[in-house]
Image (spheres, rainbow, N blue to C red):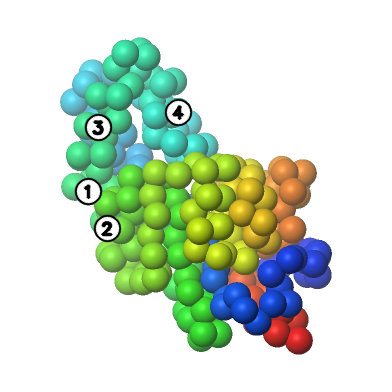
Amino acid sequence: MASTDQNPPQHPLRHSPRHPLTVGFDLDMTLVDSRPGIAAAYRALSAETGVEIDVDLVVSRIGPPLETELAHWFPADGVAAAADRYREIYPDHAIAPSTALAGARESVAAVRALGGRAIVVTAKYEPNAKLHLAHLGIEPDTVVGWLWAEAKGEALREHGAQVYVGDHTGDVRGARVAGALSVAVTTGPCDAAELRTAGADVVLADLTGFPAWLAAFEADRAA
């Protein structure tokens, strides 16, 4: 169900017909529940390296770049190698266990049904992000990886996104840099209060409410 944030503030692109609808989505915990897969990949990395990793803690704070998380478990001079190895073993451990979140497929389809473009902008290693989407049958127009927080805003601006949907306060910051409307879902590590405090324009419990919200947004933008 949607929150009471149903009337987003005016956006500079909302009433301009020169800008076709483009919606950006985060990947982990926005479109994909990657917790089971990420947990499996970390367990494999832990077993291979002998480094103890609290996997439950790791999956409770998915969002920031991989190296940020690995720095909690590996010495500074070992983080880069651990990250490289994690990305190598990820496809064999993380893709199959991960599932689409409720409303994910329908939300991407809703953008297309309105004649728009759906793009994924994620901090995840781009080839692995594409593997997740292909496995789940989610087909965005573009996937851009290895970008976090404010850096996401650069890609969103380049693609002319009017809306960015994410689950983390870092996603809200990325939307702000792009001048895009920030739509936040509470399916990730950040609750509604955190997301609103960070500046989210709209907060939804999950993506099941997004297609209806988007239809109203686009009708208002075209008015």
Which residue matches tag 4?
A: 68
User: Which of the marked residues, 3 or 1, is nearer the chain's N terminus?
Assistant: 3
Marks 1 & 4, CB-CB < 8 Å contact: no
User: Which of the marked residues, 1 or 4, is nearer the chain's N terminus?
Assistant: 4
What amino acid type should be assigned to the residue bearing mark 4?
Answer: Thr
Residue at x 59% of width, y 48% of height: 174
Which residue matches tag 1?
A: 91
Q: Does dot 2 land on a helix, a strand or a loop?
A: helix
User: Which of the marked residues, 3 or 4, is nearer the chain's N terminus?
Assistant: 4
| Horizontal and vertical percent position of residue 136 | 33, 66
Q: In the image shown, does 1 or 72 lie closer to the viewer?
A: 72
Marks 2 & 4, CB-CB < 8 Å contact: no
Q: Is residue 16 visible?
A: yes
Question: Cα distance, mark 2 to mark 4?
Answer: 22 Å
Give the position of the N terminus as an image quadrant: bottom right
| Horizontal and vertical percent position of residue 82 | 27, 26
Q: Residues within 10 Å of mark 4 (few under 14, many from 20)?
A: few
Question: Cα distance, mark 3 to mark 4?
Answer: 13 Å
Residue at x 61% of width, y 54% of height: 178
Question: Cα distance, mark 3 to mark 1?
Answer: 13 Å
Give the position of the C terminus as an image quadrant: bottom right
User: Which of the marked residues, 2 or 1, is nearer the chain's N terminus?
Assistant: 1
Marks 2 & 1, CB-CB < 8 Å contact: yes
Q: Which-is-in-front pick, marks 1 and 4?
A: 4
Marks 3 & 1, CB-CB < 8 Å contact: no
